[in-house]
Amino acid sequence: MSSKDCLELVRVFFPIKNPCLTYNYLMEILGVKIDDLDFSIRTQKLLASASMETLGDLVMSSEEQILKIKYSGKKSLNEIKEKLDEFLLKIDMNLSRYEISKYNLKNKLEEYKKKVENNEHTRISNCR
């Protein structure tokens, strides 16, 4: 399944903005490719130049890191924030309760993808 297909499914099955994210929702969204989103060409290019490929890469970044990217500014930062907000995400998000960090994000996404392919994933909710 492509990232675009995944994104469309998530929009259909999780249409309500709910501050209580499920692990499955989070993993599906963090894996969405930046190229599959409707960012401006300028923002897409500056994120590509910084090797940011997924929404997960964005939420693991700080505002300062994004602003340090060549040709980045407040306009592109605001565009990124608005896009993340559509998915209930934000820059510099603390995902430690899901045991996700910038150091293990790629591995966690790969593990989740394998579990989904093998139909081994379970619904985990970390709502408190």
Image: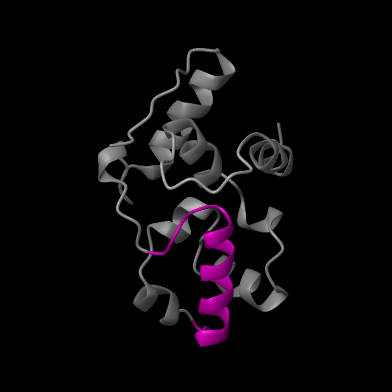
Which of 11 and 27 lies nearest the eye of the viewer? 11
Snapshot quadrant of residue 106: top left
Q: Position of residue 35 (x, y in %)?
A: 68, 57
Question: Magenta includes 82?
Answer: yes
The question of residue 95 being in magenta is answered with no
Q: Relative to 111, does residue 60 appear above or below in the rendering?
A: below
Q: Is residue 71 visible?
A: no
Query: Where residue 105 sits in the image (x, y, percent)?
Result: 38, 44
Please give the range of residues in magenta: 70-91
Q: How many marks?
A: 0
Question: In the picture, which quadrant includes the N terminus?
Answer: top right
Q: Along the horizontal axis of the image, is 28 left or right of 60?
A: right
Image quadrant containing the C terminus: top left
The residue drawn where x is 30% and y is 53% is 94
For the point 39% across and 36% down, which residue is it?
Answer: 107
Q: Is residue 93 above or below residue 99?
A: below
Q: Residue at x 51, y 22 (%)?
A: 114
- Kindly identify the residue that appears in the image at 44 percent across and 74 percent down: 66
- Where residue 64 appears, as percent x and y from the top left, is 35, 78
Nearer to us in this view, 89 or 69: 89
Can residue 5 be seen here? The reply is: yes
Up/down of 102 relative to 82, above or below:
above
Against 102, is 84 above or below? below
Of residues 55 and 86, the one drawn nearer to the viewer in this rendering: 86
Say whether residue 51 is left or right of residue 35.
left
> What colour scheme governs how the chains and residues are painted in the rendered image of this protein?
one colour
49 lies left or right of 67: right
Residue 81, x across and y down, in percent: 51, 69
Image-quadrant location for residue 46? bottom right
